Every structure is written in structure tokens, then in C-alpha cells.
């Protein structure tokens, strides 16, 4: 009787011919010495330039959403006479280049890239808008803590990086409490922990172990945090101080892994983005969740182009306008941004970004005038005029070959 | 010989002997997760280099093998992350062994099974490979992935069910 286990074992064996000892590449003599290892890792970097990029892919893909919406961009309603021109600054987090690049939104001009330690993957901004905290998530190590993983503050007035704060584990995501006192870094694989950082003294607290690997995290304006995990189709509150997951809200079972969460500025509804159920499927699901009753609403289906063959998952990011009327879903596989009317929960016509620039991360200016889509493959940021939903001329950031745009965050 | 040099040689020996004993199985494990031999070899070599760098901090030498297994899983994830980007840039890499373009598997049934596995979520693929290729007990898989044993068990059974469903639909 051929059980599924047997079929799997046979397939595994067929895929991996036993390797003869003489065919195992030798660890060169003394290659294990740290100095040699350095050379080696540089070579690996050339082979796979972004291999060491950032934490857990799902979390990385999510951060744009989280930081874009929550990265403590003040959730204020759009003024009656909405200003047409965007103002403020967007920050592009580039894990490949190890930089954070400011863009002046009034002129769409990029400023000088700010060098940060390690490979930045996410950023959160203090409620006063004066300081950003960048999480670095690069990790290829094993399960032992290394204490060289950092969170780094950036002074947003002078756009200069401060002294890195060492953590035991790399950070894949970061949220800051509404009172501005604490940042919580989510440490992904291999640690699965949350480490608090006291923002008054910039000192890390003790990591708290998590029972599940998180795929997304978001903080509501009232300071309650919510997560999704890589293992179950559920959305749940989390007490970040003790790492304890609360009662889950089930998402419909036919979806793929949940990868991004955005919370409406009024804090009443969360939107969970799930991958298509299989790579051949073309449907992304956005599930609205009523946070006052903890119930899932009817899933919103957004058609999407499937990702290229042999590639797992696809970048998806979501941002909500400050007035809470529209969500914008960025889809990296199809290079489109789809507006979703949040009054009726219906998706609109997808906005196509010209020239296949990708769409890996999205943020909306604090005054709601424009969205900014970070495109990894072309190292550009495309502004979208939200009055007309039309993309504007892309803004070039960095070189291209080393780009690893993980997130984009706006400040007023 | 100075004490630190002796210590260094002992560390070299430990890494080399672990490499000799486990590299082949780990390369095959990585191959199942990343799909091509070159990337798999790179991941495993990097994991052993990492082990060497971390040895001074590793108090219990029995933890060396779990360390390196975790590092291999971690390295495979890095490769997949890089590919996510490379796919968007149209940078070519070897087609995975289970793809139609690869001649690695002659048997259609086995290719179908692996292609179905490749469509599962990442965590499921890791649990299945550790469980049904390396034949590790659930407690060890839980330690490698840093999750509870219950999570390993439920992930495996969900993954098998999904796999059975998918393969049934195809045939």
C-alpha cells in the first residue's frame, strides 16, 4: 500500500542521489578560520547578491504594510480641503545596500543615503516623528545568540544614524508603542522571540520566547498588537510584553499563508492579506477583521498574476489612506497596485506600473495625497497620485544591483 | 603549542569530522529545499563555516550538529529570499530538480510529488524534509526549527493532508 508518506520518501530519494564522498566539496583546509570565512561569504554574496538579505521572507514582505501604515504615521483624518501636493519625507529601507534613503515628497528628490549597520529590513517611527528605529534582520547563523544584531536609531531631523543597539537576535520587524516608550522587535527564525527596547535609554530588555513564527505584526492606535503566523490561517492578538498569543480569529481555510496586516486609522478594522492558495492560483485574499467583535468579514478577492515558476511566494504589501477610505494592495509579482474601497470592500481597477518595476513595498504620504511604491528590481520608487490613481515618473534610488527594498515609511 | 592554537585545532577537527559525517545528508536536505545542487552545497558549506565561527560560544559540543542543521535551514531560506528577488529581475538559476526542465528525476510520479511539495508553505516543506528525508524525530525537528513539538506534529499532518489532496486532484 502506497501511503502518501511512502510516496514522499520515494520522491525525496529520487531527487537526491546519494552523494559519494569524493563528490562532496571539501571544506578547504583552514577554510574554517574566521578570516577565510569572510572571503568566502563575500564570494557567496556575489553568487547570490541578496542571499543574506533579511529575516523571514514573509515577515520581510509584510513590514512595508506594517510600517507603511503603522510605522506610526499619525492617523489623522484628511483635512476638508485636501492639499493636492504631498508633503513630508519617505524613507526607503534597502537591505541590499545597508542604507535608508530619504525622499523629499514635495519635490520627489532623494537625499543622501543614510548608512546603517547590518542589513535593514524594517523601520518604525516614534510618535513625535523625530526618531526612526531600524531593525536589521540579516541572519544565516544557527540557533545560538550572537549579540551583534542591532536596532539602530536615526535622527530624522538631521537624517543621521545613531549608535546601534545590540540585540541577541536579528530583528525582522519592529513596532513602537503609541506612548513612544518601547519598541518591540520581532526576532524571526531561528530565535522566535520578541525583544523590547527601552526608547528612553535605548537599552534592550530580555527576549521573550514565542511559541510560533510570526508572518506579520501590526500595532493598532490603542497599542494593541496583532499577528499572523506562518503555520495557521489565523489572526490573533499578542501581548508583546510576555509574548503570549490571544484568542485567534479564523481566516477562511482555502487561502494561502497570511503575510501582511494593516489596521484602519480608526483602529476598528484590521485587514489581513493572504497569499494565493497555490502558486498557480491568481487570487489574493484580503480579509477584513472587526476588532471590536473579533470576527472575520467576507474575504475580498483580488486577482493577481501568479509568481514566476520555481519561486516561492510573492511580495505583497498593503497601506491604508489616512482617512481610512481606501486600501492599496501592492503586488510584486504582477507589478500592480490595486485600490480597495473600504466602505464597500470592493477592489477597483489595478494600477499598472510601467516597465515591470515590481512593487515590493508601499506607503502613503501623511496627507493622503500620494502613495509611494518601492520597486526592488529597478531600484526606483513610483509615486501614485491618489486623486486620480495615476503613477508618476519613478524616482531612482541607489545603484540597482544591490537593491533590496524591504520597506518604505512616510513621515509628515 | 600555545593553548589557543591547540584549541583552534580541536575546533577545526570537530568541524571537519562533523562535515565528513553529515555534509552529504545535509546537501541532499538543502537540495530538497532549494532545488539545485550548487546552491545546496553553498548553503551547507556556509553553515559549517558559521559553526566554526560560533564554536567558542557553543558551550555544549553536542549542540554542534543541531546548530548546523538550523543553519542549513536558515541558509535555504536565504537562498529562497534571494530568488524571490532574482525571479523578479529575471536572473536565471538552475531549474529545481523537480521541474520539467530538469532531467534529475526520470519518474513522473516522483516529480509530481516533489512539485506538489514545492507548492506547500515554507514551514511545511521544512518539516516534511526533516521528517521524511532526514527521518528525524519530532522533538529534534522542533529544536531545529525553534517551535513546539505540537507545532511540528500538526504542521506535518496538515502538510501531508494538503499533499494528498493536491495529488488526488492532479491524477
Image (cartoon, coloured by chain):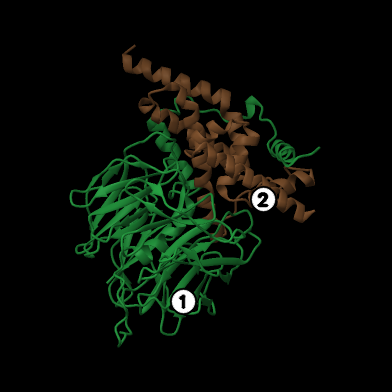
Chain colours: A green, B brown
Give percent across and percent down for residue A378.
Answer: 47, 65
Give percent across and percent down for residue A406.
Answer: 42, 58
Q: Quadrant of the N terminus of chain B?
A: top left
Which residue is disc 1 drawn over? A342
Left or right: A306 with respect to A356? right
Q: Is residue A207 above or below residue A34?
A: below
> In the figure, residue B49 lies in which quadrant?
top left
Q: Secondary structure at mark 1?
A: loop
CA gap, disc 1 and disc 2: 33 Å
Q: Give the residue drawn at x 36%, y 36%.
A: A145
Q: Is residue B96 above or below residue A129?
A: above
Q: Which mark is residue A326?
A: none
Left or right: A325 with respect to A337? left
Q: Give the residue drawn at x 19%, y 64%.
A: A157
B71 or A30: nearer the eye?
Answer: B71
Give neighbour class at mark 1: few <14, some 14-19, many 20+ (Cα, 10 Å).
Answer: some
- From where the camera sits, is residue A230 visible? yes
Which residue is disc 2 drawn over? B162
Chain ID at mark 1: A
> In the figure, residue B127 lies in which quadrant?
top right
Q: Give the residue drawn at x 53%, y 79%.
A: A348
> In the figure, residue B38 lies in which quadrant?
top right
Give percent across and percent down for residue B82.
Answer: 51, 51
Chain ID at mark 2: B
Q: Is residue A291 above or below residue A50?
A: below
Q: Is residue B77 above or below residue A352?
A: above
Farthest residue to the bottom: give it.
A81
Amino acid at each position: 500500500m502506497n501511503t502518501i508518506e511512502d510516496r514522499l520518501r520515494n520522491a525525496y530519494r529520487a531527487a537526491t542521489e546519494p552523494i559519494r564522498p569524493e563528490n562532496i566539496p571539501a571544506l578547504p583546509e583552514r577554510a574554517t578560520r574566521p578570516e577565510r570565512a569572510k572571503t568566502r561569504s563575500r564570494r557567496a554574496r556575489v553568487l547570490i547578491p541578496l542571499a543574506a538579505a533579511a529575516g523571514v521572507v514573509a515577515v520581510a514582505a509584510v513590514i512595508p504594510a506594517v510600517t507603511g501604515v503603522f510605522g506610526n504615521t499619525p492617523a489623522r483624518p484628511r483635512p476638508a480641503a485636501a492639499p493636492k501636493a504631498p508633503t513630508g519625507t519617505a524613507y526607503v529601507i534597502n537591505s541590499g545596500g545597508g542604507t535608508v534613503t530619504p525622499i523629499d515628497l514635495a519635490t520627489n528628490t532623494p537625499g543622501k543615503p543614510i548608512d546603517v549597520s547590518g542589513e535593514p529590513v524594517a523601520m518604525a517611527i516614534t510618535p513625535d516623528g523625530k526618531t526612526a528605529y531600524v531593525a536589521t534582520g540579516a541572519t544565516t547563523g544557527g540557533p545560538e545568540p550572537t549579540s551583534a544584531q542591532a536596532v539602530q536609531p536615526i535622527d530624522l531631523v538631521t537624517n543621521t544614524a545613531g549608535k546601534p543597539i545590540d540585540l541577541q537576535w536579528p530583528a525582522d520587524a519592529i513596532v513602537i508603542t503609541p506612548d513612544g516608550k518601547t519598541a518591540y522587535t520581532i526576532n524571526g527564525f531561528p530565535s522566535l522571540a520578541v525583544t523590547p527596547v527601552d526608547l528612553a535609554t535605548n537599552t534592550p530588555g530580555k527576549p521573550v520566547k514565542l511559541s510560533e513564527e510570526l508572518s506579520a505584526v501590526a500595532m493598532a492606535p490603542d497599542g494593541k498588537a496583532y499577528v499572523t503566523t506562518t503555520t495557521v490561517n489565523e489572526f490573533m492578538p499578542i501581548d508583546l510584553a510576555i509574548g503570549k498569543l490571544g484568542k485567534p480569529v479564523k481566516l477562511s481555510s482555502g487561502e494561502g499563508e497570511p503575510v501582511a496586516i494593516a489596521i484602519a486609522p480608526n483602529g476598528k478594522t484590521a485587514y489581513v492579506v493572504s497569499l494565493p492558495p497555490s502558486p498557480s492560483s491568481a487570487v489574493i485574499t484580503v480579509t477584513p477583521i472587526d476588532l471590536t467583535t473579533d470576527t472575520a468579514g467576507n474575504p475580498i478577492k483580488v486577482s493577481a498574476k501568479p509568481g514566476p515558476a520555481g519561486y516561492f511566494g510573492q511580495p505583497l504589501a498593503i497601506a491604508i489612506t489616512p482617512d481610512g477610505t481606501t486600501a492599496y494592495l501592492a503586488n510584486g509579482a504582477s507589478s500592480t497596485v490595486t485600490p480597495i474601497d473600504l466602505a464597500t470592500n470592493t477592489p477597483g481597477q489595478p494600477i499598472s506600473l510601467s516597465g515591470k518595476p515590481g512593487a515590493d513595498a508601499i506607503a502613503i504620504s501623511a496627507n493622503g495625497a500620494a502613495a509611494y511604491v518601492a520597486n526592488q528590481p529597478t531600484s526606483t520608487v513610483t509615486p501614485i497620485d491618489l486623486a486620480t490613481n495615476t503613477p508618476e515618473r519613478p524616482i531612482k534610488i541607489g545603484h540597482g544591483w544591490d537593491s533590496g527594498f524591504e520597506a518604505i515609511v512616510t513621515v509628515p | 603549542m600555545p593553548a589557543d592554537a591547540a584549541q583552534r585545532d580541536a575546533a577545526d577537527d570537530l568541524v571537519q569530522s562533523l562535515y565528513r559525517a553529515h555534509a552529504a545528508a545535509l546537501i541532499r536536505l538543502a537540495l530538497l529545499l532549494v532545488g539545485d545542487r550548487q546552491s545546496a552545497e553553498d548553503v551547507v558549506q556556509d553553515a559549517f563555516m558559521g559553526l566554526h565561527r560560533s564554536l567558542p560560544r557553543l558551550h555544549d559540543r553536542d549542540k554542534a550538529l543541531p546548530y548546523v542543521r538550523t543553519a542549513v535551514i536558515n541558509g535555504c531560506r536565504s537562498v529562497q529570499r534571494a530568488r524571490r528577488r532574482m525571479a523578479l529581475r529575471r536572473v536565471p538559476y538552475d531549474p529545481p530538480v523537480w521541474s520539467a526542465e530538469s532531467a534529475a528525476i526520470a519518474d513522473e510520479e516522483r516529480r509530481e510529488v516533489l512539485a506538489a511539495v514545492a507548492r506547500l508553505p515554507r514551514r511545511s516543506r521544512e518539516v516534511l524534509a526533516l521528517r521524511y528525508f532526514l527521518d528525524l524525530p519530532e522533538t529534534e525537528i522542533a529544536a531545529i526549527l525553534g517551535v513546539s513539538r505540537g507545532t511540528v506534529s500538526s504542521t506535518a499532518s496538515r502538510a501531508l493532508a494538503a499533499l494528498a489532496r493536491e495529488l488526488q486532484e492532479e491524477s
